[in-house]
């Protein structure tokens, strides 16, 4: 029974991060889906081996703080600017530099950059996958790859690009 549950959680985590990666309508939904993907990774590691809850808490602590801070940033931008659709670039860093910086730091912390305990927690999660579980290592690696791509995609779509308000200067290609 135990051998059937943890691959299911790994598969659900990968499906959730792929859903977040392909999200086009709402950045907040993609952000939450990416966080729940990390939660399913933690659940699958719990079912895979006997892991101390402190290690799981260490892994999720940085991701949880970064996810909350990032969600607050997205909520503030949505309250000030309206839609946060991911189908085009918004360029909100022109008017909201502080929020863009805080969101970038939360993106880095969320994806496992060494500014949160998640960085060490990811290594701890990989140590609890046995050497003969190559499928799980592959699923976990794919999940972290798409997680980072998803998070940075959200950042670039919301904060980079030309601002949608016409009174900001635009650099033309011919200049």
Image (cartoon, helix red, strand yellow):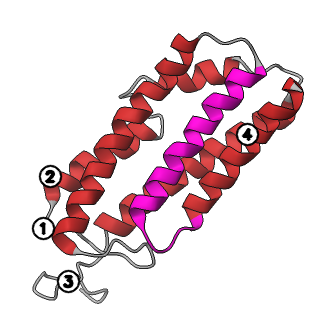
Whether residues under marks 4 and 1 lie with C-beta atoms below 8 angstroms apart, the answer is no
User: Which residue is found at the position 29% from the left and 65% from the top?
Assistant: 159
Instruction: Name the residue carrying label 4.
Output: 10
Q: CA distance from mark 2 to mark 4?
A: 36 Å
The question of residue 96 being in magenta is answered with: no
Instruction: Name the residue carrying label 1.
Output: 95
Where residue 150 appears, as percent x and y from the top left, is 52, 56
Eyeballing the image, is 85 above or below 153? below
Examine the image and state in which quarter residue 39 appears: top right
Q: Nearer the viewer, residue 20 or 166?
A: 20
Whether residues under marks 3 and 1 lie with C-beta atoms below 8 angstroms apart, the answer is no
User: Which residue is found at the position 22% from the left and 49% from the top?
Assistant: 101
- Mark toward the start of the polypeptide (3 vs 1): 1
Whether residues under marks 1 and 2 lie with C-beta atoms below 8 angstroms apart, the answer is no
Where residue 58 appears, as percent x and y from the top left, is 47, 19
Whether residues under marks 2 and 3 lie with C-beta atoms below 8 angstroms apart, the answer is no
Closer mark to the observer between disc 2 and disc 4: 4
Q: CA distance from mark 2 to mark 3?
A: 21 Å
Instruction: Name the residue carrying label 2.
Output: 98
Instruction: Name the residue carrying label 3.
Output: 170
Eyeballing the image, is 156 above or below 119? below
Q: Which residues are magenta?
A: 22-48
Q: Is residue 102 left or right of residue 118?
A: left
Q: Is residue 98 left or right of residue 151?
A: left
Closer mark to the observer between disc 3 and disc 1: 1
Residue 32 visible, this angle: yes
Task: Give the class, few, some or many, for how many residues have Cα within 10 Å of label 2's Cα (few <14, many ≥20).
Answer: few
């Amino acid at each position: 029974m135990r051998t059937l549950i943890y691959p299911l959680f790994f598969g659900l985590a990968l499906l959730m991060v792929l859903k977040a990666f392909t999200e086009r309508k709402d950045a907040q939904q993609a952000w939450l889906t990416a966080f729940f993907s990390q939660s399913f990774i933690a659940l699958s590691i719990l079912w895979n081996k006997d892991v101390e809850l402190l290690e799981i808490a260490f892994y999720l602590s940085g991701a949880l703080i970064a996810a909350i801070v990032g969600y607050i940033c997205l909520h503030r931008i949505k309250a000030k600017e309206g839609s946060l659709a991911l189908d085009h670039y918004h360029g909100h860093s022109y008017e909201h530099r502080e929020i863009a910086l805080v969101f970038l730091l939360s993106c880095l912390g969320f994806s496992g950059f060494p500014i949160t305990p998640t960085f060490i927690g990811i290594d701890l999660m990989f140590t609890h996958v046995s050497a003969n579980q190559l499928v799980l290592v592959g699923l976990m690696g794919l999940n972290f790859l798409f997680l980072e791509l998803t998070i940075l995609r959200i950042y670039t779509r919301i904060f980079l690009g030309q601002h949608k308000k016409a009174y900001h200067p635009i650099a033309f290609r011919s200049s």
